[in-house]
Image (cartoon, rainbow, N blue to C red):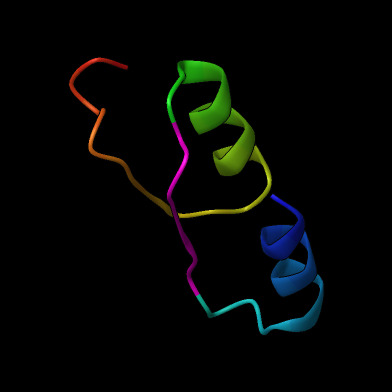
Amino acid sequence: MEDILIFKENIGADVKMKAAGGIRTKEDMEAYLNAGCDRIGTSGATNI
């Protein structure tokens, strides 16, 4: 999450971000989406 917040502060508005790795719950997924990610990559998507 720390990296996502740093990227969001320092990149242009047209750059899209994808969070991946360690996303295991619906709450994790929502937190990354709320932080500005446009996509989520997780092998556990069907479980979430």
Residue 16 versus residue 25: which sits nearer the camera? Answer: 25
Q: Residue furthest left?
A: 46
Residue 40: percent from left, percent from top:
38, 46
Q: How many marks?
A: 0
- Image quadrant assignment for residue 43: top left
Residue 23: percent from left, percent from top:
45, 35
Queried whether the magenta region covers residue 21, the answer comes back as: yes
Residue 32 versus residue 21: which sits nearer the camera? Answer: 21
Q: Is 37 located above or below residue 16 in the figure? A: above
Q: Residue at x 78, y 81 (%)?
A: 10
Residue 37 versus residue 14: which sits nearer the camera? Answer: 37
Queried whether the magenta region covers residue 22, the answer comes back as: yes
- Image quadrant assignment for residue 30: top right
Q: Residue at x 70, y 64 (%)?
A: 3
Residue 35: percent from left, percent from top:
68, 46
Residue 17: percent from left, percent from top:
49, 66
Prevalent SS, magenta region:
loop
Residue 32 vs residue 40: left or right?
right
Q: Residue at x 66, y 84 (%)?
A: 12
The quadrant in which the C terminus is found is top left
Q: Is 31 located above or below residue 33 in the figure? A: above
